[in-house]
Image (cartoon, coloured by chain):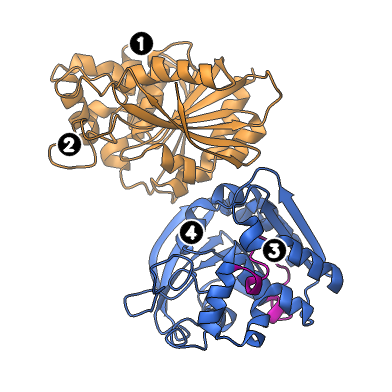
Chain colours: A blue, B orange
């Protein structure tokens, strides 16, 4: 059961926003989906976009500039929320924006009080794809994934952790090694506890070190991104991919920052890159 | 003197937001400008975008999806605010959103208390172009104009009222005959007074009836626009252009509404249409 919150025509397709009761999070969850016009009976490939800290589905839906490219490629674009939300959902005890609601970090929490609702891994690995396959003309044999910042982390770890699920994975300004940076350490400690062994499959660099593999990765990152050195550390992904023989295309974009002004500049490139791989 | 509020790199250019003290409005005014990368010394054509009711520069800047097309065309894109703003600026006495701040209707008000600050015609016809020519690499011999809803009205009336200023004019979902519709009648009565003769140059259809001319006009309008029949009435522009011999291309876009999901769908078309005419 999904409830349609809005559907509007845009770029030769339908941009919708939907709500459903999630069993993974025990809360209502909202996501957006863009479905290009298509022949009756056709099923379209799906590009998942995971958003960054503080974002909902709305940021990329309004500012991501993906619709023209997805319409041209005949590709469904799904943008989930970044965490469970609501008055009954726990949040950062200090009221900060980098943890709790809006900052689910795409894990299944094992520690109280987070473990009841913060199950974004199961939500994205199982529940939402099934829902999308049921309610939209989606070909679940052809899925790719991308994301921004915390969502880039989510895209990388989901692709590495679910072999064969995604035909391709890319990221904008991803957190590549959450165990090694402040945002990630705070989140993983609270959600997963102090035993860092449990963190490794939720850390793209550690997962690759432990043997997880994808064929190739496309990453764009702005060299004027204020989080580059402290939170993102793309050089750690470069080293891990070099050691593992993963074909990483890492593009350091001169002058670009961490915002949707950056993401939207390269969104059409990513959509086309995924479309090419989804068509193989 | 302009103050830079922000400048970020986007789509191969610089997206900035700027503030300056306006002599036309006696207030501070904010506008955005996108300047594509260009060779030193080059001066670029300018596309003006006038926004609709309630909007600031920010709506189109975030959601308009114009930057890729403007970068490809080598065109500066300027988005002014829709009225003076501030605590000292009068506003709708009933607190409504269709008049006062955010709803300047691109006229010079003659009636108190609006006449002191609501001088958006002079601001856009004289003050802001001079400022843009001074502070940006703009070729003021090559300007075009477009806009949305109330801003489509502004684009049409400025183009009709300033012969030779703009190489081309287009609009998204414009108010084409404010004298004939509720939004327009409310605004023009308060800003210009009861003498409807003074309204006519601020009503595109009336101005054309009175002899104002442009060569051609491009209009996109959604046939699911909720304001179509009550506020927009494109058939009045069709009739006036037919009588006057103005080449109007009016495209009724099936299923599209009044939002930026509509505008962004056809923005690249409009940018390319203007670019072609600016290159002649």
Residue B92 is marked as 2
Magenta span of residues:
A159-181
Pinpoint residue B195: horizontal percent, then vertical percent. Answer: 15, 16
Mark 3 against mark 4, which lies toward the viewer? 3
Place residue A70 in its image quadrant.
Answer: bottom right
Numbered disc 1: secondary structure: loop
As rendered, which of A154 and B78 lies closer to the eye?
A154
Mark 4 against mark 2, which lies toward the viewer? 2
Q: Is residue B118 visible?
A: yes
Q: Is residue A225 magenta?
A: no
* Residue at mark 4: A15
* Residue at mark 1: B211
Q: Residue at x 46, y 54 (%)?
A: A9
* Residue at mark 3: A170
Local crowd size for mark 3, using a 10 Å CA cut-off: few (<14), some (14–19), many (≥20): many
* CA distance separating discs 1 and 2: 33 Å
């Amino acid at each position: 059961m999904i409830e349609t919150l809005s559907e509007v025509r845009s770029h030769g397709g339908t941009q919708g926003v939907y709500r459903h009761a999630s069993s993974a999070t025990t809360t209502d969850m909202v996501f957006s989906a863009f479905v290009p016009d298509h022949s009756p009976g056709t099923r379209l490939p799906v590009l998942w976009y995971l958003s960054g800290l503080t974002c909902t589905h709305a940021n990329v839906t309004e500012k991501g500039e993906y619709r023209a490219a997805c319409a041209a490629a005949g590709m469904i674009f799904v943008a989930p929320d970044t965490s469970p939300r609501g008055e009954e959902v726990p949040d950062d005890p200090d009221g900060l924006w980098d943890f709790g609601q809006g900052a689910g970090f795409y894990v299944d929490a094992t520690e109280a009080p987070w473990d009841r609702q913060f199950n974004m891994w199961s939500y994205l690995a199982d529940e939402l794809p099934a829902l999308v396959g049921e309610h939209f003309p989606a070909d679940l044999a052809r899925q790719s994934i991308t994301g921004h910042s915390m969502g880039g982390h989510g895209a990388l770890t989901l692709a590495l952790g679910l072999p064969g699920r995604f035909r391709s994975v890319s990221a904008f300004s991803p957190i590549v090694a959450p165990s090694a940076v402040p945002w990630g350490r705070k989140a993983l400690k609270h959600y997963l506890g102090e035993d860092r062994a449990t963190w490794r499959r939720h850390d793209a660099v550690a997962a690759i070190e432990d043997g997880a593999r994808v064929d190739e990765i496309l990453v764009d990152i702005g060299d004027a991104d204020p989080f580059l050195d402290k939170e993102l550390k793309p050089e750690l992904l470069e080293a891990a991919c070099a050691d593992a023989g993963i074909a990483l295309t890492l593009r350091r974009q001169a002058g670009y920052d961490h915002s949707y002004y950056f993401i939207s500049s390269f969104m059409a490139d990513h959509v086309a890159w995924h479309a090419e791989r989804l068509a193989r």
